[in-house]
Image (cartoon, rainbow, N blue to C red):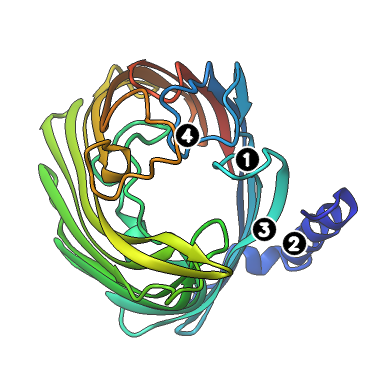
Amino acid sequence: MLNKSTTAIAIAAMLSAGSASAVILHGDKNGDHVRLFGEVGVGGHFATNAKYNHDEFFDTKGYVDDSFATLGVTGKRQQFTYRLELDYQRRNWLGGDGEFELAIDKMYVGYNITDQQWVEFGLTDTAFDDYDHFGDFTFNKAVETGEAGDQENTVKYQAKFENLIAGASYSYDGEHKSGKLQGDIINGYVGWMSDTISVVIGLETRGGSDGISKYGKQKQIGLGARYKAMSNLSFGVNAFLEDEDLSTRKSGKVFLDYQTFRNKGLTVSAKYDLNDRWEIISSVNHEEYEGWDLISPNYDYTKLPPQHGKDRRWASLGFNFRPAKDIVLSVEGRAGEAPEAAYAYARMYF
């Protein structure tokens, strides 16, 4: 983790980069521009539940802080683009320590092939990561799809033609968020967008670590859909099905005996707009991992069986309040086999 002085230097450098060219920051008549952007959010998870915690939190206690900040610069010069983004985040995932860390979230150079097609090279999110929660309206997101997320050494292509969208990416020597090797990762999506119904289907596959880490080969399909029933009422569906090879035995530093585990999840959510400032959001969720199943031939009997059994289900109800277009105050309560009882957050964008 970077210390406070390093953090201050990094943020100051980015701020000075933007303020040194204040005119260019707003762009010119040719469309070239440099823009500073960011967000600051304070909040977290309340009454985290040890019985239902899968891999959400480093610890289960009354309150787990999830405060977050982002600062970045994007730019365009002729057909070339770039993005540099810094995140200041909590290491809250299972195996983390809950402390803050400063990390480079994105760092890439892009090229606009046409107005509807573009490519990116560098550290960026994989293609399917852009739509992995497309049908989930909850602020904190519900069932995790588990796709690759941000990866270094990535080449990504995306396109948007009126209603049709598509994208594909390739990441060399991909890594899990813990830093463990996962092998080369290929994923992509195709979707149809309209005012009433929108659907996105995503696919992902990875090559595996070949004994270097516990992560072997993987295949996954994901689906996200939204339906606008009325001007102020929308419904969403988000689902995934994954076959993931994981090592079940280790000899010294070599991981052996990879077995296939099937994982699946489903979220059905709804959003009702009371007015321009208030939204009510609800969801029901189902999540199932073969590693939780006692009768699975791959169950690890060195671990205690999960108290929720081979799957878990929960529901949520919450609201978003937007006092301004760049401010969101969110509160969400959960019931059932949820990893937390509530979530509250205040986030400001610029």
* Residue 113 position by quadrant: bottom left
The relative height of residue 115 versus residue 5 in the rendered view (above or below) is below
Characterize the local packing of mark 3: few (<14), some (14-19) or many (20 or more) Cα atoms within 10 angstroms. Answer: some
To which residue does mark 4 refer? Answer: 325
Residue plotted at (60% across, 16% down): 62
* Front-lying residue, 109 or 32: 109
Label 3 sits on a secondary structure element that is strand
According to the image, label 3 marks what residue?
Answer: 103
Q: Which residue is mark 1?
A: 68
How many badges with numbers are in the image? 4
Q: Which residue is mark 2?
A: 14
For marks 1 and 4, the one nearer the N-term is: 1
Residue 124 sits above or below residue 230 on the image: below
Query: Between marks 2 and 3, how big is the CA–CA gap?
Result: 14 Å
42 relative to 267 in the view: left or right: right
Query: In terms of sequence position, does the residue under pointer 3 or pointer 1 come before the other?
Result: 1
Q: Could you say where residue 101 lies in the image, as x and y percent from the top left?
A: 71, 50
For label 2, the SS is helix
Provide the secondary structure element on which disc 4 rests. loop
Circle nearer the N terminus (2, 1): 2
